[in-house]
Image (tube, rainbow, N blue to C red):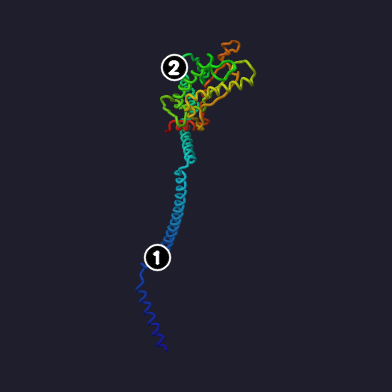
C-alpha cells in the first residue's frame, strides 16, 4: 500500500515538472500593464459610444435639412415671398452693420420718387402745350397734379364739358395713354430706367372735379363728383385701355373724386376766377413704402417682365 502511494506521488511530481517546463516568464503580464490596457479598452469603448451619438445627431440634422430644403423648393408663392423677405432683411442688416452712418434709404427713395414725378408732370405739360392749342394747364405748387383751369371747360352748373373742352380732354387722354406705362404695373407696363430712374410707381391717378364758390356745399360736392365722372368717361371712351394701367393691388390707377368748392386756385370774386375754379385736376399719387424692404420689392415688380 505504501509503495502504491509513493508511486502515485512520483507520477504527480513528474506531471508537475512537465507543466513547469512548458511555462515561461514571457507568458505573464505585470499588473500595472494589465490595468493600463483595461483603461485603454474603456477609453476606446467610450469613444465608440460618442461616435455612435455623433452619427445619430448627424442623421437628425440631415433629416431637418431635407425638410427645410423641401420647404424652400416648394413652388409656393407665399413661401417664396417669405424667403425673399428674409433675404431682404438679412441684406438690410448687413448694410446697417457695414455702414451704420449711411443715409436713410427710405428718405433717398422718396426724394427720387418726388423728383421723378416732378419730371413726369413737367414733361406732360410740355407735350400738352405743344400738341393741344388753347389748353391752360399748370403743374400744381406741390408738383403732384396737373390743373386744367377754366378756359370754358365747364359752363356754370354743368357737369358735361363744353365741346371745346371735350375735344381737349380726349387728346389729353391720348397723351396719358402713351406715358403711364412706365410708372404702373399690369398688362400695359413699359418700365425702363431711362424714363423712370427713380422707380416711381403710381398708386392712383385721380380725376378730381372742382366747382366755383357759388351754391351750397352739398350741391357743389355732388356737381364736382359728376364732373370728374364725366371726364373719366370721356377719356376712357377715347382710350379704353387707360383702365389697364394697374397699381400694386392689381387695381386700375385711374379713379375719380370730387372736392366741391373747397380747393379754389383763384378768387371767386371775379368771373375769370370762377371760370378757373370750374376745373379738373389730374393728381398723381405715388406709392410710399412702409419699410425699407418694400423698396426692393417695388423695383423688382417694376423691372420684372
Q: Position of residue 260 (x, y in %)?
A: 60, 20
Task: Classify 274 as above or below 189.
Answer: above
- Number of residue marks: 2
Identify the image quadrant of the N terminus. bottom left
- Mark 1 sits on what residue? 29
Circles 2 and 1 in contact, beta carbons < 8 Å: no
Give the mark, 2 or 1, whose residue is nearer the N terminus.
Answer: 1
Identify the residue at image location x=46%, y=44%. Answer: 74
Identify the residue at image location x=36%, y=71%. Answer: 23
User: Crowding at label 1, few (<14), some or many (≥20) Cα neighbours within 10 Å?
Assistant: few
Task: Classify 280 as above or below 68.
Answer: above
Of residue 262 and residue 150, the one placed in the foreground of this image is 150
User: Crowding at label 2, few (<14), some or many (≥20) Cα neighbours within 10 Å?
Assistant: some
Instruction: Indicate the quadrant where residue 40 lies.
Output: bottom left
Of residue 185 and residue 244, the one placed in the foreground of this image is 244
Q: Position of residue 124 (x, y in %)?
A: 46, 20
Task: Classify 29 as above or below 176.
Answer: below
Q: Position of residue 90 (x, y in %)?
A: 47, 36
- Mark 2 sits on what residue? 131
- In the displayed orientation, state which residue is furthest to the bottom: 1
Helix, strand or loop under label 1: loop
Of residue 41 and residue 48, the one placed in the foreground of this image is 48
Helix, strand or loop under label 2: helix
On screen, residue 36 versus residue 154, left or right, reads left
Q: Position of residue 151 (x, y in %)?
A: 53, 13
On residue 96, the disc is none
Of residue 197 and residue 266, the one placed in the foreground of this image is 266
Q: CA distance from mark 2 to mark 1?
A: 113 Å
Amino acid at each position: 500500500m505504501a509503495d502504491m502511494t509513493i508511486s502515485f506521488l512520483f507520477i504527480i511530481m513528474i506531471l508537475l515538472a512537465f507543466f513547469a517546463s512548458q511555462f515561461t516568464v514571457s507568458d505573464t503580464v505585470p499588473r500595472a500593464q494589465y490595468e493600463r490596457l483595461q483603461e485603454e479598452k474603456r477609453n476606446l469603448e467610450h469613444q465608440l459610444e460618442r461616435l455612435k451619438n455623433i452619427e445619430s445627431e448627424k442623421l437628425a440634422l440631415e433629416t431637418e435639412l431635407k425638410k427645410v430644403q423641401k420647404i424652400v423648393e416648394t413652388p409656393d408663392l407665399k413661401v417664396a415671398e417669405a424667403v425673399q423677405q428674409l433675404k431682404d432683411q438679412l441684406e438690410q442688416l448687413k448694410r446697417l452693420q457695414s455702414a451704420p452712418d449711411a443715409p436713410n434709404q427710405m428718405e433717398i427713395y422718396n426724394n427720387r420718387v418726388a423728383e421723378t414725378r416732378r419730371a413726369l408732370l413737367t414733361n406732360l405739360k410740355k407735350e400738352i402745350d405743344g400738341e393741344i392749342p388753347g389748353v391752360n394747364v399748370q403743374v400744381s405748387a406741390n408738383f403732384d397734379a396737373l390743373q386744367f383751369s377754366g378756359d370754358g371747360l365747364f359752363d356754370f352748373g354743368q357737369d358735361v364739358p363744353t365741346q371745346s373742352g371735350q375735344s381737349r380732354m380726349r387728346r389729353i387722354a391720348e397723351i396719358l395713354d402713351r406715358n403711364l406705362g412706365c410708372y404702373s404695373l399690369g398688362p400695359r407696363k413699359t418700365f425702363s430706367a431711362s424714363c423712370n430712374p427713380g422707380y416711381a410707381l403710381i398708386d392712383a391717378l385721380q380725376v378730381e372735379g372742382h366747382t366755383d364758390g357759388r351754391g351750397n356745399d352739398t350741391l357743389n360736392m355732388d356737381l364736382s363728383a359728376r364732373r370728374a365722372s364725366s371726364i373719366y368717361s370721356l377719356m376712357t371712351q377715347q382710350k379704353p385701355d387707360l383702365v389697364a394701367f394697374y397699381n400694386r393691388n392689381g387695381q386700375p390707377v385711374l379713379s375719380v373724386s370730387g372736392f366741391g368748392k373747397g380747393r379754389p386756385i383763384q378768387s371767386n370774386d371775379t368771373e375769370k376766377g370762377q371760370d378757373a375754379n370750374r376745373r379738373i385736376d389730374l393728381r398723381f399719387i405715388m406709392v410710399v413704402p412702409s419699410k425699407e424692404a418694400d423698396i426692393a420689392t417695388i423695383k423688382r415688380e417694376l423691372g420684372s417682365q
